[in-house]
Amino acid sequence: MSAISELSSFSRRKGKATAEEKKANGRDNKAAYIFLLPWLVGLLAITIGPMLMSLYLSFTDYNLLQPPEWTGLENFTRMLTDARLHNSLRVTFTYVFIGVPLQLAVALLIALVLDKGLRGLPFYRSVFYLPSLLGGSVAVAILWKQIFGTTGLVNQVLAMFGIQGPGWISDPSTALGSIILLHVWTFGAPMIIFLAGLRQIPNMYYEAAKVDGATTLQQFWKITMPMLSPIIFFNLVLQIIGSFQSFTQAFIVSGGNGGPSDSTMFFTLYLYQKGFGQFDMGYASAMAWVLLLIIGVFTAINFIASKYWVFYDD
Amino acid sequence: MTTKLETLPAPDKKSGAGKPTNHRKPKVRESRGTLAFSRSQRTKALIKHAILILAGGLMIYPLLWMVVSSLRPNDLIFREPGLWLNSLEMGNYTSGWSALTHPFGHYMLNSAIVVIGSILGNLISCSMAAYAFARLQFTGKKLFFGIMLLTIMLPFHVVIVPQYILFSQIGWVNTFWPLLVPKLLATDAFFVFLMVQFIRGIPRELDEAARIDGAGHPRIFLRVILPLMVPALATTTIFTFIWTWNDFFGALIYLTDPDMFTVPVALRAFVDSQSATSWGSLFAMSIVSLLPVFLVFLFGQRFLIKGIATTGIK
């Protein structure tokens, strides 16, 4: 059971106390809070405290040197007219809404091919999984920078076919595309979750469908997709949340400036520049809350929409 | 645990040796079907293998090419898209190793310190919190558990500005503490969740037996639960290793003194300092930086795959 299904079942379970919870007289508060102490301190000092603090800072002007100065909604009204911020939102949304579905589609496709007891499965699985472990590293971002450079690997291969490729990462129209491709390249992790999900589908459904003369495509749409939908949903939520926060790749590939001409200026990159480049901490905090809001809204939309397409078999 | 074993069906050895027995269920999944089917199935498998080899090759090729290129003279990197090596050029490694303020080993040592500290921190703090959530009854348990699940999805950026202010006021910028203290306080809630799931699978009878023998919670935790949750601890160790080793954002913000650089920020400094002439040594150090992750992947794959499949972590 995943964190997400646990969360979504949280509301459903409400009211119905389990047998275990009913023996409320057997509480060990003291022992529990001792065990929870590190986590509680972390929650207060590292998570909730800073969250409230950044909410406060988002209404101030603060540069680390002078004490924060209350400016009300100014940071937020500034955002409305900040063209670079609007651009960074556009870049991030493009990345999320092209990169995530593309990555999940590839992950599902390869998982479907890999399923059904194919020989050499562990080997293939390792090969496809490896990039998702390395993909977040600076080293791979450096590799990407070379591969999609003007005289990089991609253009060398294209030249063998007599094609003169563009400078993928120095051209504003293709730079973001090459970073999206890097995201797709790391499809191994969701693929493994899909593989685990596919294995959970009882084989008898397919046998019954075959007896009824269902085609492979029909079986896919009528059995595989509904049965797999909770897993697809789970992957979708996780990947969307993660992709909105993506930073390292764009930072390294663009040399830290989100270029060329802001075409890879992710929201997080702009936030970093504002906060840790220009020490405009108030504005950076306001941006962070906007990011939280965006992620929250999209996660909520995901959960609401899931009622119409995710099929729970319980 | 023993009760589980006893309910399993008798091993195959007994039934398979003599005459055919009827209590063994016939295998429905036809890996070797009837003759009429086998041919089309074999071509189907062949097509699948062809797709997988092609896709897998495409995925892994950039990595292989980077390894090969790091062993080539510099100018060939921009002319040779193939994987053929005429001679082994180790010069990239020696020049890359000493290209920055410190030998590259210095940064690896820094990374190793952060990684080991993070692993210990996560193992101790997360397992304690998980024990409380999985086994103890206490006031506010449901609320805290819900909060814990939510923090898994909380974007790092919302807390980074105040965290930075906090740590810089304590004077911890350019120390490893800002990277280590959050781990000691169980802020990687994913691992808490992973461990909670695991502990829930350990039979409660074992705790009860220990309690009847007079053991308190610390003793049950240390002597009963911890030894049984080694697989979950291994998964946590491996993921913490990989994530911390690759962590760029935290190191970028807190470590600005080259003495304290971890591998990702050192690599970034390398990219920035070099012109396009030294891609060979840049590749060489990138390979060196990926090697530990690759080794962990090689030996810890089992735990990685299991960890992802059950919790859906990246």
Image (cartoon, rainbow, N blue to C red):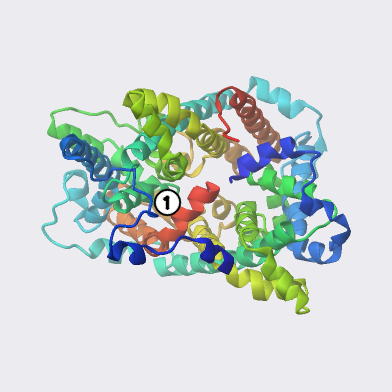
Q: Residue at x 59, y 72 (%)?
A: B227
Q: Is residue B228 shown left or right of residue B106?
A: right
Residue A69 image point, x, y percent: 81, 37
Q: Which corner quadrant of the image does residue B256 belong to?
A: bottom right
Residue located farthest toward the left when viewing the structure as drawn: B86
Secondary structure of residue under mark 1: helix
Q: Nearer the viewer, residue B189 or A52?
A: B189
Task: Read off the chain for label 1.
Answer: A
The vertical placement of B135 against A259, above or below, is below
* The N terminus of chain B sits in image quarter: bottom right
Q: Is residue A161 shown left or right of residue B44?
A: left
Q: Is residue A181 visible?
A: no
Q: Nearer the viewer, residue B305 or B174?
A: B305
Structural crowding at the residue carrying mark 1, measured as other residues with C-alpha within 10 Å and reported as few (<14), some (14–19) or many (≥20): many
Residue B158 image point, x, y percent: 68, 41
Q: Residue at x 39, y 52 (%)?
A: A139
The vertical placement of A236 against B82, above or below, is above
Q: Residue at x 78, y 38 (%)?
A: A14
Residue A231 image point, x, y percent: 51, 37
Residue where numbered disc 1 is placed: A133
The vertical placement of B70 against A17, above or below, is below
Which kind of residue does numbered mark 1 sit on? Leu
Residue B38 image point, x, y percent: 18, 39
Q: Which corner quadrant of the image does residue A274 belong to?
A: top right
